Image (cartoon, grey):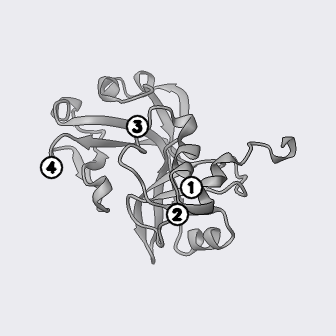
């Protein structure tokens, strides 16, 4: 388990977190500042809305389910995209996440840019409606309450082929007792 929140790390909801916005969610941290707060996107909440319906010009570049993902409860009427570049260069319309090595080719996409400028530059892309945000100290309080695990990300987490299994997948690869949490039933009363 990671010791601190960092850009490119994951916040994994504990079974105690029953907020419907975050129940069994995996959040990729995109920005973190002790004084300014934390911003991330929920990686495992595909919506029913196809990319074609909202951003048709980007549809051909989207990886995995061709739908918008519910990035979180904040500004759900706005979109944010993440993409992996093929090379170490920074193409126009893409900005590298300032995180650890696991996310060195992962960055945000300027959805106002023409998709053609990134078409040959990226290998994977997902679009998120909204984001998750915490003010300074808010996430620390939630961590102390036992709502989140802070863990390292793997390069494949952002574009996991089956988002419905990502929560269990991330927990299973953890060391020690944390791996056992992956077996926690959806409804403990039915256990």
The image position of residue 176, as x and y in percent, is: 58, 62
Secondary structure beneath label 1: strand
Q: Nearer the viewer, mark 3 or mark 1?
A: 1
Q: Nearer the viewer, residue 131 or 87?
A: 87
| Mark 3 vs mark 2, CA separation in Å | 23 Å
Q: Residue at x 30, y 35 (%)?
A: 124
Q: Nearer the viewer, residue 91 or 54?
A: 91
Tag 2 and tag 1, C-beta contact below 8 Å = yes
Near mark 2 (Cα within 10 A), the count class, few <14, some 14-19 or many ≥20, is some
Near mark 3 (Cα within 10 A), the count class, few <14, some 14-19 or many ≥20, is many
Secondary structure beneath label 4: loop
Q: Left or right of 179: which side holds 55?
A: left
The image position of residue 51, as x and y in percent, is: 42, 26
Above or below: residue 96 compared with residue 4: above
Q: Residue at x 55, y 31 (%)?
A: 47
Disc 1 marks which residue?
12
Residue, far bottom: 35
| Mark 4 vs mark 2, CA separation in Å | 27 Å
| Mark 2 vs mark 1, CA separation in Å | 6 Å
Looking at the image, tell me whether mark 3 or mark 2 is earlier in sequence order: 3
Residue, far right: 189
Secondary structure beneath label 3: strand
Q: Left or right of 78: which side holds 23?
A: right
The image position of residue 48, as x and y in percent, is: 56, 26
Q: Residue at x 37, y 28 (%)?
A: 55
Looking at the image, tell me whether mark 4 or mark 3 is earlier in sequence order: 4
Disc 3 marks which residue?
127
Looking at the image, tell me whether mark 4 or mark 2 is earlier in sequence order: 4
Q: Which mark is residue 150?
A: 2
């Amino acid at each position: 388990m990671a010791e601190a929140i960092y850009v490119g790390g994951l916040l994994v909801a504990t079974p105690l977190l029953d907020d419907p916005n975050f129940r069994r969610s995996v959040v990729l941290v995109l920005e973190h500042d002790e004084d300014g707060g934390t911003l991330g996107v929920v990686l495992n909440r595909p919506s029913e809305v196809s990319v074609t319906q909202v951003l048709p010009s980007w549809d051909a570049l989207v990886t995995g389910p061709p739908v918008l993902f519910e990035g979180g409860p904040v500004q759900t009427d706005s979109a944010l995209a993440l993409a992996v570049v093929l090379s170490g260069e920074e193409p126009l319309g893409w900005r590298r996440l300032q995180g650890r090595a696991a996310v060195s080719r992962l960055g945000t996409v300027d959805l106002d840019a023409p998709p053609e400028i990134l078409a040959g530059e990226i290998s994977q892309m997902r679009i998120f409606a909204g984001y998750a945000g915490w003010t300074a100290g808010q996430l620390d309080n939630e961590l102390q309450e036992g709502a989140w695990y802070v863990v390292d990300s793997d390069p494949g987490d952002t574009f996991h082929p089956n988002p419905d299994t990502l929560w269990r997948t991330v927990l299973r690869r953890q060391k020690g007792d944390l791996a056992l949490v992956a077996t926690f039933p959806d409804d403990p009363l039915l256990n």
